[in-house]
Amino acid sequence: MTDGPIFLVAGASSGMGRKTALKLGEGEGHVILAARGLEACEEAAAQIRAGGGSAEAMQFDGTDAASCHALIAAIEEKHGRLDGAFNNIGNTLGDSPLHETPPERWDAAIAVNLSSVFHLMQAEIPLMLKQGGGRIVNNSSTGGLRGTRNMSDYSAAKWGVIGLTKSAALDYASQGLVINVIAPGIIATERFREFEERMPEIFDKLRVETPIARFGEMEEIAEVVDWLLRSAPAYLNGVVMPVDGARTA
């Protein structure tokens, strides 16, 4: 078993997940970086260890319930506990008006953005209950707080993540679990940069429409998640926290 808190970052191979894992790796405890892309997780884990932190990589598929349960079982077998989890599985799979959205894309969007969080929580929560407590942060989107034109599948799934989080907080708050959800706005991930290069005029407009007059940085998401998992008061429970430069305000 490892001394200090055990943290899981699910979806740690790139983007907000990777940055959050690196941030958690700066503090006390051990960070488990998990995703389908094992090599990228191993590279980030090595970076944490090179900086004096403790980390390892594991491979799993968030859309596969059995894979999620196997991941948590492996963590329990090796470390005996799981103190904090950032469930950061999600992706946009295309855009179209609702009536032109292929049913296959709808099913895939729900699987990757919503069912993955359900599968992870269903595996994480029994272990946290067994040890007497734990913290979970789920990653939704401002698309889960308001409609998103031509992305009804993605928006519906992200609304679902918020409802799932709030319901779970009600189920387990009296048993020592703290479960919150963040709703990032437009964050400058690697994928975002690719879109910005292709459609600069659209992103210039979005930048102007953001009250803070810039897009968010992945490090800012990492700081929020690190705080929620480590030191935020336990009374802050069942909360959806926009991190969006005041766009939804």
Image (cartoon, grey):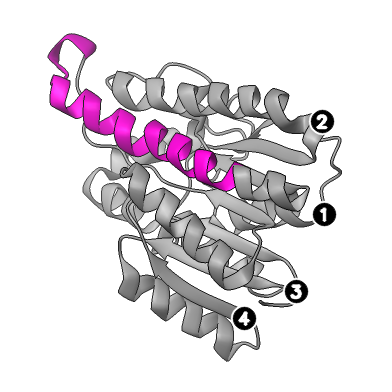
Callout 2–callout 4 Cβ contact below 8 Å: no
Q: Are marks 4 and 1 in contact (CB under 8 Å)?
A: no
> Helix or strand or loop: what does disc 2 sit on?
helix
| Quadrant assignment, res 162 | top right
Q: Answer left or right for 174 relative to 68.
A: right
Relative to 119, 67 lies left or right: left
- What's the residue at 50%, 29% (across, down)? 161
Q: Is residue 103 magenta?
A: yes
Give the numbered dot on residue 174: 2
Q: Residue at x 49, y 33 (%)?
A: 141
**Chief secondary structure of the magenta portion:** helix
Q: Amino acid at mark 4?
A: Ser
Residue 168 placement (x, y as % from top left): 63, 28
Residue 166 versus residue 120: which sits nearer the camera? 120
Q: Which residues are magenta?
A: 98-125
Give the residue pinned by disc 1: 231
The label shown at residue 54 is 4
Q: CA distance from mark 3 to mark 2?
A: 27 Å
